[in-house]
Amino acid sequence: MSLVGSSLAAVVSALVAGVPLLTFVYTYTLKARIKMRVGEEVILHYTNRQLLILTSDFIFLNTGAQQAAVTAVYGTIWRDTDRRPESPNLAWEKYEKSERTQPDEPYRTHSTAIVEPIVISGRSAFNARIRLFSYSPLQLEGNDGYYFLRLEFADGTSKLKMASFNYILHLDQHNAEDLLANGAEQLVDDGRKSEFRVRISLKRSRSMPDTTPGHLLAGLPDRLLRRKNPKRSAMFESVGRWRIN
């Protein structure tokens, strides 16, 4: 056998021998890596104590081979003309559920379940409709305006992880006024329960980032600016009162 043929055979043998190893690494040993995103809609309203509730469908993707845990989700929301708060002002407290007890009855939407750590197997995903509550009374202004939303999650370590995207929420004049005037829950059943009257729906805009004012991009969180990639942000525009399909 020639020298070239021997070398080629050795390379082929090495590649063949390496395939099982690569398969093992890919399947079993790669560290967990979580990506967090939100769905196509963000919903806003208030508790009867004026705590802001931000609701959306959250998706957690584990692209690693090992199991991962999500122990908490935090949000920071602020007006584009203000400075970003030094610490999160929203936290995951509840899931949301829509149900009806009888086929001919309207759906009832409410908070449900105690938040517990989520365990996500390797190369899998978890999704749920989640409600983030503000720590203290937090009302958005009753006029047309833009808000930044920064989302982070905890995985049991000491450092928070950022969501895959940063978000801009736009409330137009009509919906901002409606949220401020009618967005608070009311106590019912002799004060034992609370029900919302109005929730404002914001839908993901497909025109992002072309229509985004330049000063908004300039105010995005530092991590986004370091990427120099405005496509890593997403705009949500208010479309009116939320109604279940």
Image: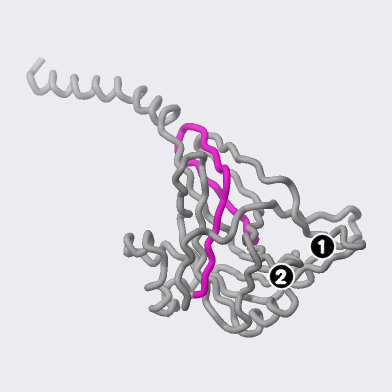
* Badge 1 density bin: few <14, some 14–19, many ≥20, Cα 10 Å: some
Q: Is residue 162 left or right of residue 89?
A: left
Image coordinates of residue 110 in percent, x first then y, are 77, 57
What residue is drawn where x is 62% and y is 62%?
134
What residue is drawn where x is 76% and y is 67%?
48
Query: Which segment did they paint magenta?
Result: 54-79
Tell which tag, 2 or 1, sits nearer the viewer.
1
Quadrant (top left, top right, bottom left, bottom right) of the N terminus? top left
**Residue 52 against residue 64 in the figure, above or below:** below
**Mark 2 highlights which residue?**
199
**Residue 182 against residue 229 in the figure, above or below:** below
The figure's colour scheme reads one colour
Quadrant (top left, top right, bottom left, bottom right) of the C terminus? bottom right
- Dot 2 falls on a residue whose secondary structure is loop
Image coordinates of residue 63 in percent, x first then y, are 46, 41
What residue is drawn where x is 32% and y is 64%?
228
Based on the picture, tell me whether residue 85 belongs to the magenta stretch: no
**Dot 1 amino acid type:** Ser
**Residue 91 position by quadrant:** bottom right
Residue situated furthest left in the rendering: 3
